[in-house]
Amino acid sequence: MTLTAALLAYVLAASLLTVTPGVDTALILRTAALEGPKRAAMAALGINAGCLLWGAAVALGLGALLAASELAFNILKWSGAAYLLWLGLQMLLKPRSEFSLTSTAEEERHGQLGWFIKGLLGNLLNPKVGVFYVSFLPQFVPAGYPVGSFSFALACIHVLLGLFWAAALILATRPLATFLRRGGLVQWLDRATGSVLLVFAAGLALAKR
């Protein structure tokens, strides 16, 4: 496989995987719709920072540990499932009753940092990302290229695709902001997202290497 063919095949495959709905999409859409584009952008940055760190781990050979060690995989798997469960229950049991389009500077800073951390942890605590990278990325490394560094470059491409997709999601939800002053809709969206996160938590808990 030539370099050009490998990159084209990878971009196509990674693009399809990026737009496939998952927990990251749910978090970005919910945050964009209810918290505003700045906080949604921070959540997206956190999610993609997690992907970048996983890419670096795979390049350094650490990702192979998750593929080989059942104990390491299970520890990270249950930590991630517990984190998603906690996020989902927070939204499901304590939905907000209203949405405000304005916020103080302190709330804005804390909100943005909080959603960055949520996005980051949601990815770092998901061992399936590491196992996916260690099994998926090497397939697109052309002959004669170093697997570690080229795999990290592919992970960087995946992160760029993820950022573009997150921006598209945020822009798509922005026109809905005027409808979000309705308390009932805010509660419904919080509970719906919480339910989705619980489903993903269960899926992660049942995942196998």
Image (spheres, grey):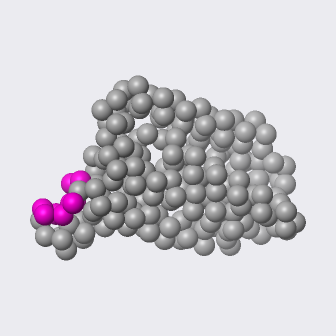
Given residues 31 and 135, the one toward you in this image is 135
Q: Residue at x 36, y 43 (%)?
A: 62
Residue 11, position as x, y percentages in the image: 31, 67
- Is 43 left or right of 184, judged from the image as shown? left
Is residue 146 among the parts visible in the rendering?
yes
Q: Residue at x 49, y 71 (%)?
A: 164
- Is 66 left or right of 109, judged from the image as shown? left
Residue 13, position as x, y percentages in the image: 30, 60
Whether 201 is drawn above or below 15: the answer is above
Q: Residue furthest front?
A: 60
Is residue 179 among the parts visible in the rendering?
no
Residue 144 counted in the magenta span: yes
Secondary structure, magenta segment, majority class: loop
Q: Give the magenta-colored segment's residue range.
A: 138-146
Whether 208 is drawn above or below 172: the answer is above
Q: Residue at x 40, y 55 (%)?
A: 56
